């Protein structure tokens, strides 16, 4: 059984489609997480997919075969990310697993689940990173009011929706 590792490839400008096509032709697995967005095309809003990490692509290869030089010379790829001269730096598997869990089968990032009052959440804001609380209420402008236990008393914190992740429902 071979042990495949994920690596991060830096792409040439607008090279993602070409790199994915050529890497797959060579037998490499690729992962390009994308996010749905809106862009103006001829002054009209149009739904588009944008890379979650513009200019980068994940490539899976067997490190024992030493085929990473093949990846570097693939059309659309500028180079594999290397932190030292010994070879490309592997991406930890838990990062890839978490990204894949948040994406659908086509690699498109799913929208976060809707929150409701009473949901248990974990905070990803710098000041409250890792703390857990309960959703108290939601505002119309994508802000969430969270009830936290802080120094023996309940405190309400107001954060952007992007800094809150539901962990379980208390309903």
Image (cartoon, rainbow, N blue to C red):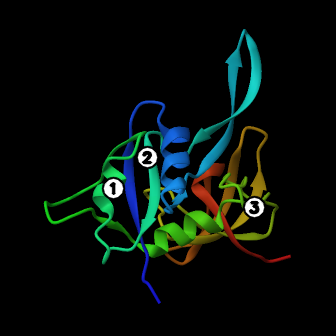
As drawn, the residue found furthest toward the bottom would be 1
Label 3: which residue? 136
Query: Which labelled disc corresponds to residue 15?
Result: none
Sequence-wise, the earlier of marks 1 and 2 is: 2
Q: Gap between marks 3 and 1, in whole Å?
A: 53 Å
Q: Is residue 153 left or right of residue 10?
A: right
Q: Which dot, 3 or 1, sits closer to the camera? A: 1
Q: Where is the C terminus found, in terms of image quarters? A: bottom right
Label 1: which residue? 70
Residue 122 in the image: above or below residue 34: below
Residue at 71% from the left image edge and 43% from the top image edge: 142
> Picture quarter containing residue 55?
top left
Across and down, in percent, residue 13 comes to 42, 30
Label 2: which residue? 56
Q: Gap between marks 2 and 3, in whole Å?
A: 38 Å
Q: Gap between marks 1 and 2, in whole Å?
A: 17 Å
> Picture quarter containing residue 132?
bottom right
Q: Is residue 150 left or right of residue 64?
A: right
Contact, mark 1 vs mark 2 (Cβ under 8 Å):
no
Residue at 47% from the left image edge and 40% from the top image edge: 54
Q: Is residue 81 left or right of residue 8?
A: left
Q: Is residue 30 left or right of residue 109?
A: left
Residue 149 in the image: above or below residue 73: below
């Amino acid at each position: 059984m071979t042990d495949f590792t994920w690596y991060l490839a830096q792409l040439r400008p607008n090279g993602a489609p070409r790199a994915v096509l050529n890497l797959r032709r060579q037998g490499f697995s690729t992962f390009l997480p994308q996010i749905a967005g809106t862009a103006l095309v001829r002054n009209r809003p149009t739904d588009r997919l944008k890379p979650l990490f513009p200019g980068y692509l994940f490539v899976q290869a067997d490190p024992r075969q030493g085929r990473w030089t093949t990846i570097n010379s693939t059309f659309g790829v500028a180079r594999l990310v290397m932190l030292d001269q010994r070879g490309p730096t592997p991406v930890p598997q838990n990062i890839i697993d978490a990204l894949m869990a948040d994406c659908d089968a086509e690699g498109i990032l799913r929208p976060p689940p809707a929150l409701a009052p009473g949901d248990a959440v974990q905070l990803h804001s710098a000041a409250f990173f890792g703390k857990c609380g309960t959703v108290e209420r939601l505002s119309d402008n994508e802000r969430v009011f969270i009830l936290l236990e802080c120094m023996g008393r309940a405190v309400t914190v107001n954060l952007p929706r992007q800094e809150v992740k539901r962990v379980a429902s208390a309903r």
